Amino acid sequence: MVDRYDFKEIERKWRSFWEERGFFKADINGFDRKLYYLNMFPYPSGELHVGHGRNYIIGDCLTRFYLMNGYNVLNPMGWDAFGLPAENAAIRHKAHPKKWTYEAIARYKEQFRTMGVQFDWEREITTCKPEYYKWTQWLFLKLYENGLAYRAAALVNWCPSCATSLANEQVVGGACERCGTPVKKKKLTQWFFKITAYAERLLRDLDLLDWPERVKVMQRNWIGKSEGAEVEFPLADREGSLKVFTTRPDTLWGATFMAVAPEHPLVERLLAERPDRALEEFVDRVLRVSEIERGAAEAEKEGYFTGWQAVNPVNNEKIPIYVANYVLMGYGTGAIMAVPAHDERDFQFALRYGLPVIPVIKRPDGRAKSLVLKGAYRPGLKEALARAGFQLEERDGSLYVSLAEDRRAEYIALVQKFILPGSWTEVIGSSWQFVFPDRVMNIGSISEERAALERCQELEPALQGKRTVAEVLWGVEFYRDLLFHAEFGEMINSGELSGTPGEEAVKRTIKWLEERGFGKAAVSYRLRDWLISRQRYWGAPIPIIYCDKCGIVPVPEEDLPVLLPDVPTVTKEGLAGIPEFVQTSCPRCRGPARRETDTMDTFVDSSWYYLRYISPHDHERPFDTRLVNKWLPVDQYVGGVEHAILHLMYSRFITKALKDMGYLDFDEPFARLFTQGMVCLGGQAMSKSKGNIVSISEVVEEYGADTQRLYTLFMGPPEKDIEWSPTDIAGSSRFIRRVWQLVNEHLDLASLPKAGKFEQAALGERDRRLWQRLNQTVKSVGDDISLFHFNTAVSALMEFVNELGDYVAGEINGPLLKVALEELILLLSPFTPFVCEELWQRLGHREAVLENRWPRYDERALVVEEQEIVVQVNGKVRGRLTVPVALAADQEELKRRAMELESVQRQLDGHKLQKVIVVPGKLVNLVVG
RNA sequence: GCCGAGGUGGCGGAACCGGUAGACGCAGCGGACUUAAAAUCCGCUGAGGGAGACCUCGUGCGGGUUCGAAUCCCGCCCUCGGCACCA
């Protein structure tokens, strides 16, 4: 009888083994075959569930695999230990966040041990410890010295529930990333990191990274580069000008108004010159509305006319300046030139506020329309148009003509003869023209637009109320789809640039503007500077002192760390509520001074931690530049895709900044990135608040850690989100028991001498097959693990175990079976280390699994001597042949044998063979007519 | 709206570079063992047809290229993720 598979006993037995033997300690001074593997460190909170487990199990599996392959693997772990949940819990329980955090850390560590997940614990780092955050503060000082940290007053995102400001990246859909409360705008003086200085490099260097494409795409979107021009519009009747950014300088001649964001400095200047309650109210109202409402898809475009005007430099037309809710201070210059003919938002705004629309870009579709109203034309027009081949429809006596743009002139000439005095028609398409009996008026500038409107109103009193030509035309359903388009096209109504084709329009216009000093080429990024101030206690204090005499004084490096004051309980006021902390003396003049009371965003802590692991106990400096340059970039970084922008972008920025300061010699912190998917339950990501958690302890209790690990790696491709299945996991457990049974039934093999490799030729058929399958398995498991295809690696192992099951039912070659079982255990050990260690020992080994080399395969054993060849007739499988490898590419022989098959004969019967396709070693396709 | 990823049995998923679709596992069905059940082991399991060897259909939908398409091309539909009044 074989011992029962008692996973509890086995796992208890080996739980401390690997750590005690020090297998996971990296040789930090050995750079040969070094491999820096890193999992994103966790924020310790509550306890780990099986979804969290996925990340660490992947890491542990890979680490064991690479250790057995002779790599010097560094796989450290630490704690992203500052943060709001700990602080909020502390406030609730009138306790200190430290307590809550350290308790969670202890739980996590125990859970890692339970799962058999190993790290180089000598390198453990904890961001809330002074010996760590001292260097986070050092980082701040370096950025400050280099002009990359600055203080500015700005309207910032404010979460009323967390009582703190947030970075742009931490606002998701207008709400606080952490608690979901809608974010408000608040004017505060805050600290920023100048990440925008690196926008171009952050964008460009993405090309160097072996990262998932979707993560790179997200970062590209976030950086949001757009190219265009900056154009200066002088203010009319007063000093100054209004600078705008546009991606469509080719539409400049169609600008009919300007609009600025409510936060734009022009608004303040305006109010200073002439107080305007209504304007103030408008600005207040727009700014009060949360981002969610302001950003809502169908939000009404609203504006307020300032009474000021600007001059369009390209044509000297005066255009009004509005404050508009759809203009964002955070992008471009916070002011726009509005071209309603070619921008949908501007078009809506223009219709609402009665602002003219001037088309300046040809329609690429070349469509145009003309409506000739009943009573506006002489009889015979319809017939004349029909004769000329114009497409038209008559309804209620009015003629609805659709024409191609290239027949415009011909059409106008024809229709003009029929227009009655006192009437007109329009031709609306690329350009808008009004056809009167005596003349044609083009809507090519604001003055022309005014003139045409006036004339129409004279002739038709019903149009008296209309403010613009566009409004008149909008009233005609027939014209609506032609009044606006945003595509590129040939420039028209644009002075000397008229006629410039669409592909060259932007370039040519920019050149033209530069020659005249009206503007210049410009690039704009969506990326904003990183707001790092947090009005909270549980973070690294910003090392700055305010002195009435000396102003802003950075804390001298030798005074670091600025310690968090040790208080028994924490309040919502954070550091600002602790006077002993605030009061200090100025490092320069020794006079009384105040400390900065903001702490740093926790993403600052995690933006450099991967450097600290290399020399975690160094008291002299944040990291050892020499060693860091040897070990980094991280060879393989693994974490959740939720950090695609935040953490990963900040870390890239900090690395680049440190490189520019001379502390590092590499540009990118993480050479390869893998983002694992989430584990769901009930279709949703596991989360404590939703109550859909499968805890690691309950799974380990029922099945053991090996089963949890195996199932986690087997359930599907690791990059994809997947549903945790309480029934599927049983299959993984069953598999481990089968292996257990198989090995334990053959423990007598332990006494056999160690066998080496086998010569296939000397083996009988059954043995040869087993030998080949073993070698194939060794190859595919190794290949799959290195490609992160853990699920198919496990399948291959399962197939091999099935094969072994068949084998041991018959006659056994002891030495061969011994090799097969031993290599099976080695291959399986990264997945299920506990049971493998136990089985290894039972097979008579005194050394640990990890002291063995990863099995190698014999190339020759991968070459089989017979191959199955599929026989197709017209591409459909009709039979199979088993042929010696030597014949597997022999076209004539294969054709001959294929034709002999009965099933093939039937298909060929009565048809003529036209062609034979042979894919060596794969198939024969007989094509018949 | 723009960008990205993806749609394969009852389910999770395999299928290298265009060459046997559905590996492996789960669930289900049948059998062995058992007084019985659980566990375990063996067999079957995409759909439809046929007594049967076999035949037809089948990888979101519609076309195309090819001797041959889950895979390549064109046009759609749907799901998920990111960005979104970005000038």
Image: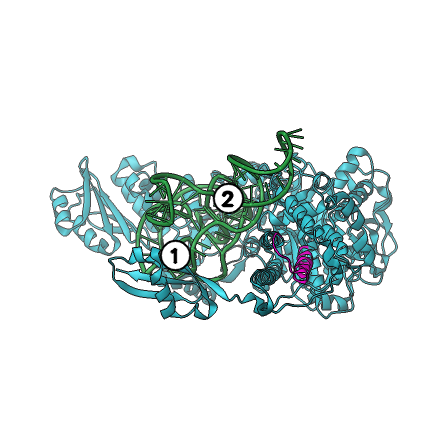
Chain colours: A cyan, B green
Which of A558 and A812 lies nearest the eye of the viewer? A812
The amino acid on which the numbered mark 2 sits, given as a three-letter code, is Tyr
Q: Secondary structure at mark 1?
A: strand
Please check the rendered image and state whether residue A825 is part of the magenta-colored stretch, yes or no. Answer: yes
Side of A878 relative to A601 (left or right): left
Q: Which residue is mark 1?
A: A879
Name above or below for residue A515 compared with residue A397.
below
The amino acid on which the numbered mark 1 sits, given as a three-letter code, is Gly
- Residue A615: quarter of image: bottom right
x and y percent of residue A19 in the render?
Answer: 80, 55
Which of A148 and A712 lies nearest the eye of the viewer? A712
Q: Residue at x 73, y 47 (%)?
A: A115
Residue A856 seen: yes
- The kind of secondary structure the magenta stretch mainly shows is helix
Q: Residue at x 28, y 44 (%)?
A: A455
Name above or below for residue B48 compared with residue A500.
above
What crowding class fits label 1: few (fewer than 14 Cα within 10 Å), some (14-19), or many (20 or more)?
some
Side of A698 relative to A902 (left or right): right
For marks 1 and 2, give the CA distance: 68 Å
Identify the mark nearer the N-term, 1 or 2.
2
Q: Which residues are magenta?
A: A809-828
Query: On the rendered image, what quadrant is the C terminus of chain A found in?
Result: bottom left
Q: Secondary structure at mark 2?
A: loop
x and y percent of residue A404 in the render?
Answer: 24, 53
Instruction: Check the residue under mark 1 and report the chain it is in.
Output: A
Which of A405 and A93 lies nearest the eye of the viewer? A93
Mark 1 touching mark 2, by CB under 8 A?
no
x and y percent of residue A176 in the render?
Answer: 64, 41
Q: Which residue is mark 2?
A: A326
Q: Nearer the viewer, mark 1 or mark 2?
A: 1
